[in-house]
Image (cartoon, helix red, strand yellow):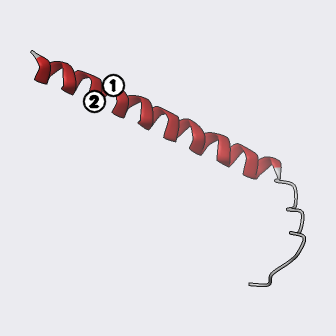
């Protein structure tokens, strides 16, 4: 990999790439929310 100084400006993302990133972001956000809720319920169960 070549070293560029100053760093080269990245090319703009295509609409298809943007849509793919947004879909992945939604999946990751949903998984994080589910895990937070699972841990919350688990900690409630242990405290009782």
Quarter of the image holding residue 40? top left
Q: Nearer the viewer, residue 17 or 2?
A: 2
Quadrant housing the C terminus: top left
Give the structural element (helix, strand or loop) at label 2.
Answer: helix
- For label 2, the crowd category at 10 Å Cα-Cα, with few meaning under 14, some 14 to 19 and many 20 or more, is few
Q: Is residue 45 left or right of residue 10?
A: left
Q: Residue furthest front?
A: 5
> Which label number is shown at residue 8?
none
Residue beneath the point at 13% across and 19% down: 47
Give the structural element (helix, strand or loop) at label 1.
Answer: helix
Q: Do the residues bearing badges 2 and 1 touch, measured as CB atoms within 8 Å?
A: yes
- Residue 5 sits above or below residue 32 on the image: below
Marks 2 and 1, Cα distance to the nearest angstrom? 5 Å
- Residue 11 sits above or below residue 36 on the image: below
Quarter of the image holding residue 43? top left
Question: Residue under circle 1?
Answer: 37
Q: Nearer the viewer, residue 14 or 47?
A: 47
Question: Residue under circle 2?
Answer: 39
């Amino acid at each position: 990999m070549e070293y560029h100084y100053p760093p080269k400006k990245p090319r703009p993302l295509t609409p298809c790439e943007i849509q793919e990133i947004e879909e992945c972001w939604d999946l990751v956000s949903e998984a994080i929310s589910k895990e937070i809720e699972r841990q919350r319920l688990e900690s409630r169960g242990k405290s009782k």
